Image: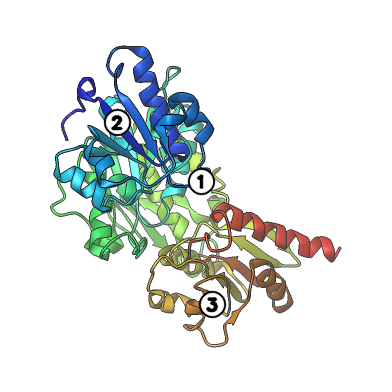
Amino acid sequence: MSKIAWHNMKHIIVLGLGKTGVSVLRYLHDKKQQGKTLANARIQVFDSRIDPPGLAEAKQMLGDDEFLNRRWEIEDTLAADIIIASPGIDLREEPIVLARDAGIPVVGDVELFAQESSLPAVAVTGSNGKSTVTRMVEFIAAQCGKNVAAAGNIGLPVLELLQPGEQPDAVMLELSSFQLESINSLKLEAAALMNISADHMDRYGSLEDYIKAKQRIFANAKTWVLYRQQQDTWPHPVTGKLMTFGNDSHPKHFGLLSGNVDRSSGPVAITFRGNVVLRADQLQLQGIHNLVNVQAALALCQAIGLPIEQAVNAVKEFKGLPHRCELVSNNGGVLWVNDSKATNIGATAAAVEGLRPTVNGRLLLIAGGEGKGADFRELQSTLECVDILLTIGEDGSRIGKLFNGSRQVKSLQQAVELASSLVQAGDMVLLSPACASFDQFKNFEHRGDSFRQAVEALYVDSA
């Protein structure tokens, strides 16, 4: 899209508060304060929640009258000169579609950032692994003496990077499909698409629509980092410099080499241009799937000028993210692993199949929650790697039907207590729900913390 003509904007509406919405309001407020660009513009914010996050700060900037605690209607959107939507807003809603049809720009915070920032940037999207890769790149850069700020769908809202102060050397963006729907101007040194599995089918009409949203990340990217095992998700034609990663070896790109370095039956060494650069037993991360994540992170690091040798040495110290295949206890020889961030089928499949080779005994899986319209039959082959299945939540029983002998319980607390009565030394208990958490918890972090607390309580009570 063309650059926003802010001097022509007399009526701006912001849809949705929260961290992103407040950062947008702060950005607009600063524009008003700094000059004449938006001096006479009216800024309204809509949010139908009774007490949305950031409400007090929004009212402080706008005043009570410009916060509308209701849904936006057609007359609201058609009266605007520009609409700025938070990522959770469905752009297929009639008031938004009609506004677009009328030529009213509909953008998100990342598009606003892209139109003003001159910082070098790389970005990652995909169904699973993108948060791990984002934090990994940030960590590697810091270890190498470079300040790379992680922002977007993780941590810092991107517009905060435009605030006065010391600027980072580069930006590492995690981008969701929702954010990508409203991005047109983002220029990237490199973009990575980790993988695609059915997710957010309650928002997209088909898997193809979801894939197309993800592919938007490559529109203005110099280097395209793509997963070889899912070439059916690649945009065509590939017009950027191609760098691939995968579960197999490759003479020119990143790959995996099979062996028994860590006594597993899977791939255990990362290769680059045919040479081993990193063994699995040199990493602190759990699971074979994380070897794929490391490859993507190393490719993005190259794009921001970090030498492969330095990046490889740095990633050896990366310990991973909370709630993502996080080891919370190893008591009595039983491993308890928190993968609460696995909110879709693909994430759970990656965790189960990645961790299974490292388990000497049985693998007990706790799954279930709010399924977001997913077809759980896609989890069938993954469940063949599981020895015991306990299900929880709104859609737990749908998963349980795929596994002979599964047991549905009412709460995560009950699942942990039942699991403790079933396991023995050498076993692993994995919370990897394949579902969102909102049926029983505030978010996936709340679910993961509840799991950790329940596990800790087991051993306090038995001490």
Left or right, 171 with respect to 343, comes to left
- Toward which corner of the image does residue 17 lie, by quadrant? top left
Q: Residues within 10 Å of mark 3 (few under 14, many from 20)?
A: some
CA distance separating discs 3 and 2? 52 Å
**Residue 12, numbered circle:** 2
Instruction: Pick whichever of labels 3 and 1 is earlier in the sequence.
Output: 1
CA distance separating discs 1 and 2? 22 Å
- Indicate whether 39 appears above or below 17: above
Q: Which residue is disc 3 drawn over?
A: 386
Left or right, 301 with respect to 186, comes to right
Q: Nearer the viewer, mark 3 or mark 2?
A: 2
Residue drawn at x 54%, y 50% is: 282
- Indicate whether 102 appears above or below 369: above
Q: Which type of secondary structure does the marked residue at label 2 adopt?
A: strand
- Looking at this view, name the residue that lies furthest to the right: 463
Residue toward you, 396 or 249: 396
Residue drawn at x 69%, y 68% is: 334
Looking at the rendered structure, the kind of residue marked 2 is: Ile
Q: Which residue is disc 1 drawn over?
A: 50
Q: Give the image location of residue 225, x and y in percent.
A: 28, 48
Q: Nearer the viewer, mark 3 or mark 1?
A: 1
Q: Quadrant of the N terminus?
A: top left
Looking at the rendered structure, the kind of residue marked 1 is: Ile
Instruction: Pick whichever of labels 1 and 2 is earlier in the sequence.
Output: 2
Residue toward you, 278 or 415: 415
